[in-house]
Amino acid sequence: MGLIYAVANQKGGVGKTTTTVNLAAALASLGQKILVADLDQQCNATVALGLDRATRPSTYEVLSGEVTLADAATLSGSDNLWVAPASRDLAGAAVELPQVEDPNYRLREQLGPVREIYDAVLMDCPPALGPVTVNALVAADRVIVPVQAEYLALEGLAEFRETMAAVRRDLNPGLELAGIVVTMHDERTRLAQDVERDLREHFQGDVYRNVIPRTVRLAEAPSYGIPIIDYAPASRGAGAYLALANEVQSRG
């Protein structure tokens, strides 16, 4: 049975989409069958994996109850990697979901046979704690939390952990933290070193050993519609995500 991961943090600009796309591609390169579910109305994960924003069905149709997540999956350009694309229509989900019965469970109810088909599902969540993110946390088994190597990100992490605790208490008691991944890390700066040290001191074993560096190649890859391991396989960014993929596999 495959695991379902929500890649989430209520703070924007911390590398959620970059991590979702490139971790998924790295896991796929290790022989796993992976599905990326893009739940962000900006459709960045969809575009970064070579699909058009107009691709249908999308995760909006999943949340609307028209199709299952398994039905929305489309093969990407990378082996073993599928995408359930996002849609601009997801902007309306925040208004529409509260009007349906059991709004927080809609995504869980519409998963379909994804656990039987895929070794892992990675859901790219929007940068806000709205109904779509709550749906992802309710549907997920584990949460991967990207955190940028800067002090303001630490405050956002504390708030997100409180949200996770509330979801676990009220909606999804089986939800677990898979790990915290430090992103946009520049080892040349004292700030990045201090933030990483503080994270490891405060959250100890919850922080992944491997960190993601700030690199130009990682920033360039989405414009070509391919993940970093295809765009620049010998780059530091590709190596970092492959190392993270192995660590995610070993942790489960």
Image (tube, grey):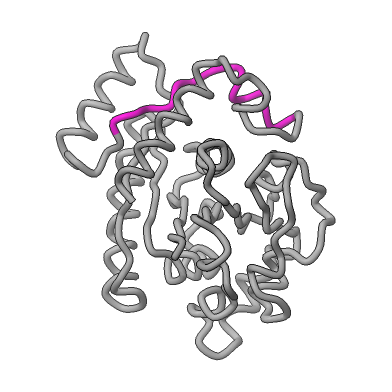
| Pick the front one: 29 or 52 | 29
Q: Position of residue 116 (x, y in %)?
A: 53, 68
Residue 40 drawn at (x, y percent): 62, 55
Q: Quadrant of the N terminus?
A: bottom left
Q: Tell me the residue at 64%/33% (across/down).
A: 227
Residue 79 showing in the rendered view = yes
Decide if residue 110 is on the left or right side of residue 167: right
In this view, 99 is above or below 112: below
Start-end of magenta stretch: 209-223
Image coordinates of residue 169 in percent, x first then y, are 26, 74
Pick the residue in front: 161 or 142. Answer: 142
Q: What's the residue at 30%, 46% (across, down)?
A: 251
Query: Which residue sits furthest front?
Result: 31
Q: Nearer the viewer, residue 125 or 37?
A: 37
Q: Residue 130, image x and y in percent?
A: 51, 65
- The residue under the point 30% across, 54% down is 177
Relative placement, left or right, of 48 versus 247 is right
Residue 17 visible in the snapshot? no
Residue 210: within the magenta?
A: yes
Q: Is residue 178 toward the left or the right of residue 86 in the image?
A: left
Location of residue 190 with respect to 15 vertically, above or below: above
Name the residue at 82% across, 57% down.
55
**Label tally:** 0
Residue 69's image quarter?
A: bottom right
Magenta-drawn stretch contains 49: no
Snapshot quadrant of residue 223: top right
Q: Is residue 87 above or below residue 180?
A: below
Q: Residue furthest top?
A: 188
